[in-house]
Amino acid sequence: MGDLAIRVENLSKLYRIGLARSRRDTFADFGSKISKFIHRPTASKLTTRNSNSDIFWALKDVSFEVKRGQVIGIIGPNGAGKSTLLKILARITEPTTGRAEIHGRVGSLLEVGTGFHPELTGRENIYLNGAILGMKRVEIRRKFDEIVAFADIDRFLETPVKRYSSGMYVRLAFAVAAHLEPEVLIVDEVLSVGDGSFQRKCLSKMEDVGKQGRTVLFVSHSMPAITRLCDRAILLNEGGVTREGPSHFVVSSYLASVRGTTSVREWTDPEKAPGGEVACLRAVRVREQNGQIADTIDIRKPVSVEMEYDVIKPGYKLLAHLQFYNEEGVHAFSAHDLDPDWRRRPRPAGRYVSTVQIPGNFLSEGTMFVGAGLQTLDPVIVQVYMLDLVAFRVTEKMNTDSARGDYAGKMGGIVRPLLKWSTQFNPHSKLGNR
Amino acid sequence: MSTKTNISSQVSDSLIERTVNAPITVVQPSKGFFHLDLPAIWHYRELLYFLVWRGIKTRYKQTVLGIGWAIIQPLMMMVIFTIVFSMFAKLPSDGVPYPIFTYAALLPWTYFSEAIRRGSVSVVNDANLVQKIYFPRVMLPISGVLTPFVDIVPAFGILLGMMVWYGLTPSWSIFVLPAFFILAFLTALSVSLWLSALNVRYRDVQHIVPFLVQLWLYASPVVYPISLVPEGWRVLYGLNPMAGVIEGFRWVLLGTGGPDYAVMAVSASMVLVLLMGGLIYFTRMERIFADVI
């Protein structure tokens, strides 16, 4: 019992939609409500309030428990209720029914830079934002230098924030928020701001928070971030919990449910296919050695990933590439299409299928997430760049001729190549006699 | 699944200790008619300080006249009123020169109108805070109503200057002046509680407020003395809490009128009723602010 950080019991949230909410209420509506109230006994046509199309359950009977020190990810498609759940736990909105208990001080990060005032300086905004997030003045003063160092805005402390670049703004906002020290931290997708290096900084800060033993509830659309940071995950869909368990398991379930199988992503409608003026992506597929679509690959066997794309505007040189991430969110490698047939040739219009072969005994065990990109060369214009398109699991059976050999323990590493070793042996050599 | 090792057992021990001793927050649908979470308000008192500080700091940023605006408004109004109501309309002024007569009323009045202006839009203006952060929402109208107090200081300085100019010295009753400031504050607060909560739902409110303030000006004894109001009507007139406030200011500073205890009693009771009602309405509406804003 002293172990529990969060307990959620049958939490539900109802929203009224439709005409009742489509326009801001004015006194005219207020007046008509009054007259409806007065006329209620006699009127029979006032029932639109109760029809089903008017109500929408953002959350329905959500229950789960989080133990102290766990880092829990919440994933799900848009509209599943993730943000609503966080809002309720952060006490911003009330549940319609149900109950939640949180043990410890709660810090919620639903957005970075909430309450920043553009006319105030960086220094002033640190204090303001910190106070808004719930820090006491003494606490802010104590952490002030750390915050400034993390945000790297030492020279601009006395400038009004409206003069900051968007990067500086976001760094400062996150720096303040990162120094919140509640026992329970609720975070909503705030890592999807800023550039790549900043995102990495945020991710590792989040990791530290988890390692310090705080309980964290983390909503994200980035599957690698979820698998990297979270022990367990909860999958929400249409207001209810559909999966709960170790994060890899839940993430694969989610990817599988979204796409039928995790290892194929297709865009059959050319209107919806992602791309630019020159080329668009139509499909990405994972195949095993015999050419069949597969989502689980034996670690010893080769795997191929194909990209199917259309060139709409001919005459451009194109670079197709795939990005491979492991389940920790680490970028394992990129594969650039250097096929000599097409490498520097301006492409005619048409449908292309480019396939990369990854040899067996190269990848490590676990889930690989694959992203794809297309860009023109001379000039470089990115047509497509999307991560987390397909995923496949690399598995290993015991007692096989893989790089593991006879070792039964855990083998780490981003790749697991089978490499050639050679040893020289001299039976007659004695110590000291070379 | 990667294992997470605690960086420092000292850190996590204190964390454990804090969690075990820490408050338990229960999130559930509000029951009951009305609930004012005083412990939470106390806990977030520093936020109130920062909200007021923010209001004061940003008030005059990038303006040339800065705090001069705090003086110009009541002074200009005094000049116009003197010309129109004293010179043209020849309204009486309880035995003191009209300019100071009206200025003594303008001092609390400009505070009040500014406080209402800010207080009524306080929740809506910070809609992004309401949607993203938890804190007792009542902080917003309170900070809106507290901020204009900073303008009183220079305006009061001018008043003292005028009193010296006209040779008026205040009596011992000046020590009661803070009570009237508090009354003005409570009036502004109670009206703002109602208006800010209504404004979240019905945005007409913020458009009505300037008009409301204009009407209220003439319903208050700013340009005319309360002695102009017929005897029988006077108690009814006292239902306007600002009547009590302004009479009080004039009495303390200029020695005119009252104290008309009947009017002040009615005003004070009115404020209490409005305040209680405002708190109830606000805290009830607070539950749906984030959903409706």
Image (spheres, rainbow, N blue to C red):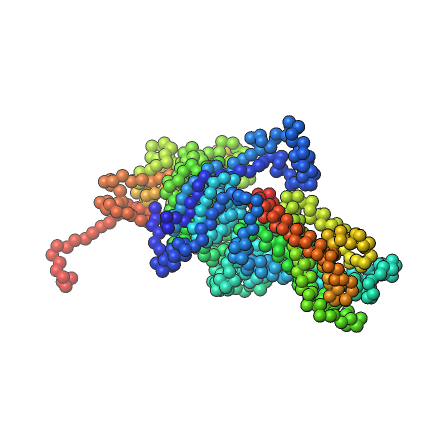
Residue B196 image point, x, y percent: 64, 49
Nearest the viewer among B199 and A283 is B199
Nearest the viewer among A9 and B133 is A9
Q: Is residue A237 above or below residue A153?
A: above
Residue A360 image point, x, y percent: 31, 41
Identify the image quadrant of residue A342: top left
In the displayed structure, does residue B14 sit left or right of residue B90?
left
Identify the image quadrant of residue B244: bottom right
Residue A133 image point, x, y percent: 52, 55
Q: Is residue A330 above or below residue B260?
A: above
- The residue lying at 59 percent from left, 46 percent from top is B284
**Quadrant of the drawing holding the C terminus of chain A:** bottom left
Q: Is residue A39 visible?
A: yes
- The residue lying at 43 percent from left, 35 percent from top is A257
Residue B112 image point, x, y percent: 70, 57
- The residue lying at 61 percent from left, 59 percent from top is B52
- The residue lying at 65 percent from left, 41 percent from top is A24
In the displayed structure, does residue A407 sit left or right of residue B49?
left
Nearest the viewer among B159 and A357 is B159
Nearest the viewer among A303 and B279 is B279
Q: How many marks?
A: 0
In the displayed structure, does residue A263 sit left or right of residue B179?
left
Q: Is residue A334 visible?
A: no
Q: Is residue A117 above or below residue B164?
A: above
